[in-house]
Image: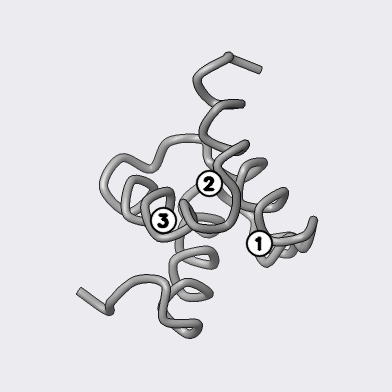
């Protein structure tokens, strides 16, 4: 766990929209952070591929108003 990654998580749930936007743009490995920030709920648990996991988290973020459907 990189210290910068941990520092972002330590900011708490307010950073969820920023993490989701970065996930949309880069497809980086934010899944663990999102699970932690989402009270350990993994919305992508049943997703197969990395791209499926990205899509599941983005759909979750859109459904809850964290990010727009852009």
Looking at marks 2 and 3 on the same chain, the residue that comes earlier in the sequence is marked by 3
Residue at 56 percent of width and 56 percent of height? 53
Which residue appears farthest toward the left when viewing the image?
70
Label 3 – label 1 distance at C-alpha: 13 Å
Which quarter of the figure has residue 1? top right
Q: Position of residue 13 (x, y in %)?
A: 58, 57
Seen in the image, is 69 located left or right of residue 66?
left
Seen in the image, is 25 located left or right of residue 20?
left
Q: Position of residue 27 (x, y in %)?
A: 38, 43
Which quarter of the figure has residue 65? bottom left
Q: Is residue 52 above or below residue 32?
A: below
Q: Which residue is mark 1?
A: 44
Local secondary structure at mark 2: helix
Q: Which residue is mark 2?
A: 50
Local secondary structure at mark 1: loop
What label sits on residue 20 in the rendered view? 3
Q: Nearer the viewer, mark 2 or mark 1?
A: 1
């Amino acid at each position: 766990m990189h210290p910068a990654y941990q520092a972002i998580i330590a900011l708490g749930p307010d950073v969820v929209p920023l993490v989701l936007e970065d996930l949309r743009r880069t497809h980086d490995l934010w899944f663990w952070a999102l699970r932690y920030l989402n009270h350990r709920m993994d919305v992508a648990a049943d997703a197969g591929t990395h791209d499926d996991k990205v899509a599941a988290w983005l759909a979750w973020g859109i459904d809850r108003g964290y990010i727009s459907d852009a």
